[in-house]
Every structure is written in C-alpha cells, then in structure tokens.
Amino acid sequence: MRDAVLETSDGLGGPAWLLPVAFTAVGAALACAIAQWVPYAAGSGIQHVEAVWRKEGETGVLWLLPAKFFGGVIAIGSGLVLGREGPTVHMGASIGVEAGHRARLGGEDVRLLQTALGGAGLAVAFGAPLGGLLFVCEEVTRTVRPRLVLLALIGTATAVSCSWLVVGGGLVFPMPEVSAPGLWLLPVFLLFGVTAGGLGAAYSGLVVGTLSFFDRLTKVPVVARAAVIGAVVGLLLVLEPAVVGDGDPLSQQLLEGRGLAVTLLTWYLVVRFVTGPLSYAAATPGGLFAPLLALGALWGALAHTSVAPLLLGHGPGTVAFAAVGMAALFAAVVRAPVTGLVLVVEMTGATSLIVPMLAACFAATLTADVLGSRPVYDSLRQRMLERP
C-alpha cells in the first residue's frame, strides 16, 4: 500500500508529494492510538518480557496480542524505521501467558512459558530457531535452566514449523558463498568490531535520549507527536524510499554484493541512524532489531570501502563486511554477542564468517562496555518501570 501511494504521487506530480507524507503521518498516529489503549503495547515489548521474568512487572492482558499485531503492521507498513521482531517476541510471550493461565499453571511455570514463547517469536521473525533459543538464555534470562531450555526448544520448533507452513522456509537474507577470510585478517575484524562498538554505544544512547526528550514535551499529545514523526519519515520516503522502513531490502542488497557509492552509503547510514530512534519515540508497536541489522550492514559496507585499498585486493569483499557488521552492531547495542552471531549466520547461511564474527562481536561488546554504554533493553526496562 505504501508503494502504491508513492507510485501514485510520482505519477500525479505537483503537490501530490504530500500524499506519502500524509500516509505515513496518519499511519503513525493510528498505530500510536492503538498502542495507547493497551498497557505495554507501545515500543518493542522485549523489555516488558524481561521485566516479567525478573518479577518486576505484571504480565500483559490478552488484548496485547491484537494491539501489537495491527499496530505493528500499520506502523511498519507506513514506513517508520521499526522492525517486526519486537512485536513477535511480545506476541509470543502473550500467547505463552494466556496458555499458562488456561492450563492453570503456577506463576513460575507461566513465567517460564511466556519467556520461552517470546524466544519462539524471535525465531519466527528471523527464521532462526537457534537464535530464538539463545535469545532466551543470553538476553532475557541470562541463565541456562534445563526446564526453560526444553520449553524454548519445543516452543521454537513448533512455532518455526508452523511459520514454514504459512510463508515457507529458506534463508531470510540469502547471500553468495563467501570464502573464509585468512587468519591474518583477524586484526582487521577486531578493529572493525571496535568501531562497531563505538557506533552501537552511540546508537543506544540516542534511542534512550530521544525517548527522554519527547517525554519532556508533556503539552504535546502522544498521538499528535506520532503524527509529526510520521510526517518527517514520510518526507524522507518521498526523497529516498530506501532510508525508511525496516531496512530489510537494503540489507539484502548489500548482502548480495550490489554495492553502493560511498556518498550514498554515508547518507543512508546517517539518516537511518537518526530515524530509527526517532521512529521508536513515536510510541507505536515496533522493534529495534531489523533497523539495527540494516545499520550494521551499512557500517560494514562503508568500512570495507575504507580498508579495501589497504588489502590490495586480497581481502574479503563488501558482502563479508556487511554480514560481520550486522552481528557486531547487534552485539554492541543488545549486548548479546552469541545471539547476534547465530542470528546472522542462520539468516544468511554465512558459516564461513563465524571466526571473523567472533572477533568482531568480542571487540564490539568490550568496546561498548568500556564506553559505559548499558545494554539497550536494560535501559528501556528501567525507563518502563520508572514511568507511570
């Protein structure tokens, strides 16, 4: 629908460029209004799943499921720079809570079920069963319990199998086969991980800082604020469609080796670096992961253009740096390096890049820690608990 509106405005010319602007503004306002009706429906929802696991918050009501579904579809479809994985995690957790209550399970078992099915939601979003399991253990619970692992295993297997029946299987981001880089290149990937760690720390700070800034605008209604943010994103949609949306087409382009000019890579990186936190501040349902992966791919491609002349044609191409950048930036922002690595490998099939990803994720995580950056979902969970 967004593409049709954009095509229509191009065909009409003149003031018709306002159509995509209005389309995105209305979509953002509508998605925000839906989220206001149900507690915890705004934002990613992963921080809420983590709070329930830690007994810091209440489980959501069943109305969370349709609110996340329709609100997320409208927000992401309208062009906001948001991802589907946060809502799918939250919806999976909501299903787990409802199933636990209907089965008359105890409170502890309900928490286990909601956490396990939250991981299943992530696995479905990215077609990454192992990534969903590791997300539960490394990010949400930060523990490995046999009962939790078993629930996550069967929940993820069932969820992914059902999703295959609907949308089919296969890699989310198929990419050409890449040879394993030589060991002499590991210092290059370590240094690249350091830069990704710095970028990730800045991105996490911008996400939380943007939310805090808009919190101070108490005289502006939340829905009106979402409409203004949507209008800004809609204007960017008119100028360059690639800088809005979840970023999956952009990631796919880079992972297929269809490179972009340095100026275009820089433009996309800067704009998406700002519009991601801005879109998240619209208080609509929507996640951070997919835009984060696109940002990592852009950073990897841009880094390759810088180091390629020094490698004298003997190093890996843009594709390798884009894939490693996705994992490294995820590790820096979320602070779950193993989950990020496995997610990217499962989505791309790039098993030959595991060692460079290990080096880059290590360096990115360590750098973000040294810079004092908190894991983004820790910050978002604290913010959620401190607000009414």
Image (spheres, helix red, strand yellow):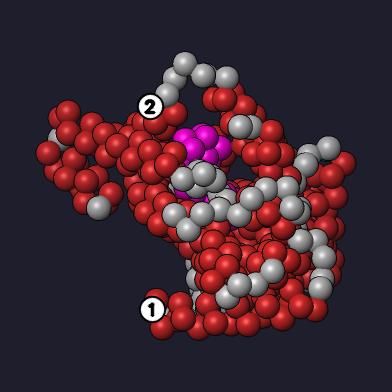
Amino acid at pointer 1: Val
Is there CB contact under 8 Å for labels 2 and 1? no
The residue sitting at the left extreme is 12
Residue 317, by quadrant, is: bottom right
The residue that mark 1 highlights is 166
Q: Is residue 265 left or right of residue 145?
A: left
Residue 261 visible within the image: no
Q: Earlier in the sequence, mark 2 or mark 1?
A: 1
Within the magenta stretch, is there residue 290?
yes
How many numbered marks, from 0 up? 2
Identify which residue, 253 or 55, lies in the foreground. 55
User: Residue 193: x, y in percent?
Assistant: 77, 52
User: Residue 370: x, y in percent?
Assistant: 87, 41
- Mark 1 neighbour density, 10 Å: few (under 14) some (14–19) many (20 or more): few
Residue 161 visible within the image: yes
User: Residue 79: x, y in percent?
Assistant: 38, 45
Within the magenta stretch, is there residue 304?
no
The residue sitting at the front extreme is 104
Element assignment for label 1: helix
Residue occupying image coordinates x 52% and y 40%: 280
Identify which residue, 62 or 297, lies in the foreground. 62
The residue that mark 2 highlights is 224
Amino acid at pointer 2: Ala
Above or below, 192 against 42 in this view is below
Element assignment for label 2: helix
Above or below, 45 against 157 in this view is above
Residue at mark 2 to residue at mark 1: CA–CA distance: 36 Å
Residue occupying image coordinates x 62% and y 37%: 207
Q: Which residues are magenta?
A: 276-294
